[in-house]
Amino acid sequence: MAHVELSLSEVFAPAAGISAEQESDNVGQWSATVSRAAEPCLLIDADTNVLAISSAGCALLCLGAPEDVMGRPLLAGGLRLVDFTARPSELTEQDTDKIAPLLALHSKQLARGLLRVKGPDEAGTTVDAISTPVFADGEVAGSLTFFSKI
């Protein structure tokens, strides 16, 4: 079986078009990158507010357009997570605290897990989520998550 290792560092080469304020802070740089990404990805802050989400991430998570969820808490932005039972029901608050984006925030470590996302017209889509904490000034300032439909 193949082994994949993900490592992120504080070093980030600024891209053209990033403001001076964003250049000075790691979260701002990741926010600009996620907003432009073709892959399904998400950046939340330490309070779980959505700082950036790619269009592909919105489509995969059934969230509408990025501007519809920006600045809102991840779980209040329309994300509907259900369990893996034959008759899916929405996850409890205790279970949602264990999803990869939130687990990476609390544990300050990489986190990975499966999510079942319910869209308006479907039983649920299974999504693999890989999250890493994002640091600013030595503290966890958010988490960055990449998604893949299974």
Image (tube, rainbow, N blue to C red):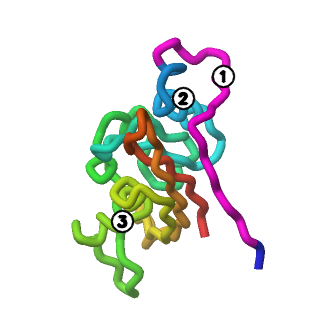
> How many numbered marks does the figure carry?
3
Identify residue for label 3: 81
Say if mark 2 contacts mark 1, CB within 8 Å.
yes
Say if mark 2 contacts mark 3, CB within 8 Å.
no
* Nearest to N terminus: mark 2 or mark 3: 2
The residue type indicated by label 1 comes to Ala
Q: Secondary structure at mark 3?
A: loop
Q: Secondary structure at mark 2?
A: helix
Identify residue for label 2: 29
Quarter of the figure that contains the C terminus: bottom right
* Nearest to N terminus: mark 2 or mark 1: 1
In the rendered image, residue 11 lying in the magenta stretch gets the answer: yes
Q: CA distance from mark 2 to mark 3?
A: 28 Å
> Residue at the location (46% across, 36% down)?
52
Q: Which sits in the foreground, 73 or 11?
A: 11
* Nearest to N terminus: mark 1 or mark 3: 1
x, y percentage for residue 136? 43, 35
> Residue at the location (51% across, 70% down)?
126
Displayed quadrant of residue 117: bottom left
Say if mark 1 contacts mark 3, CB within 8 Å.
no
Structural crowding at the residue carrying mark 1, measured as other residues with C-alpha within 10 Å and reported as few (<14), some (14–19) or many (≥20)? few
> Residue at the location (54% across, 20% down)?
23
Displayed quadrant of residue 87: bottom left
Q: Which sits in the foreground, 15 or 9?
A: 9
Toward the top, the furthest residue is: 20
Identify residue for label 1: 15
Q: Please tell me whether residue 17 is drawn above or below residue 108 in the rendered image.
A: above
What span is colored magenta in the figure? Answer: 3-21
Q: CA distance from mark 2 to mark 1?
A: 8 Å
Q: CA distance from mark 1 to mark 3?
A: 34 Å
